[in-house]
Amino acid sequence: MSHPLIDRLHGELQYTEVSLANHDQFIAEPGMNVLFFPGDPDTVKDATDVAVVLPELVKAFDGQLRPGVVTDVFGDGKMLKRQYGFSEYPSLVFVRSGEYVGTITRIQDWGEYLDQISNLFVAAPRRSPGFSIPVVTA
């Protein structure tokens, strides 16, 4: 489940390929870390569109975005998707210095990306909306 446009991100552009093994280290780096979850490019219509837009966003924000790519959809990617609680691919998950700040799903208009990401740079960290089970005390 690979595609040349997604392979280009971790091949030619050397974006970190993120898995469970290196996830915590990746998101803990100072600054704004963005995890790209493309999903399966054979079935996710916008996956390759976001793969093309992501390098342009990195340029537009003058290198302030540190991108990583989660290419394993069914193994590690499934676990990480649950952690961040988004329901649609492709998704860009933003984690500033180890703290979750938000997610942008699907393809967006350029101006919407710029506005939303600018807002995430100043947003307060929050708990990711990941899968959780409510705790009930007796």
Image (cartoon, rainbow, N blue to C red):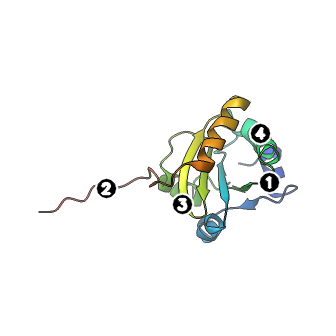
Check disc 1 and report its element: helix, strand or loop.
Answer: loop
- For marks 2 and 4, give the CA distance: 35 Å
Q: Which mark is residue 16?
A: none
In the picture, measured across the screen, residue 83 lies left or right of residue 117, that is: left
Between discs 1 and 3, the one toward the N terminus: 1
Proximity of marks 1 and 3: CB atoms separated by less than 8 Å = no
Foreground disc of the pair 2, 3: 3
Residue at the disc numbered 4: 53
* Along the viewing direction, whichever of 25 and 19 lies nearer the viewer: 25
Foreground disc of the pair 2, 1: 1
Q: Is residue 87 above or below residue 23?
A: above
Residue farthest front in this picture: 122
Q: Position of residue 88 (x, y in %)?
A: 55, 39
Check disc 4 and report its element: helix, strand or loop.
Answer: helix
Q: Which mark is residue 133?
A: 2
In the picture, measured across the screen, residue 51 lies left or right of residue 25, that is: right
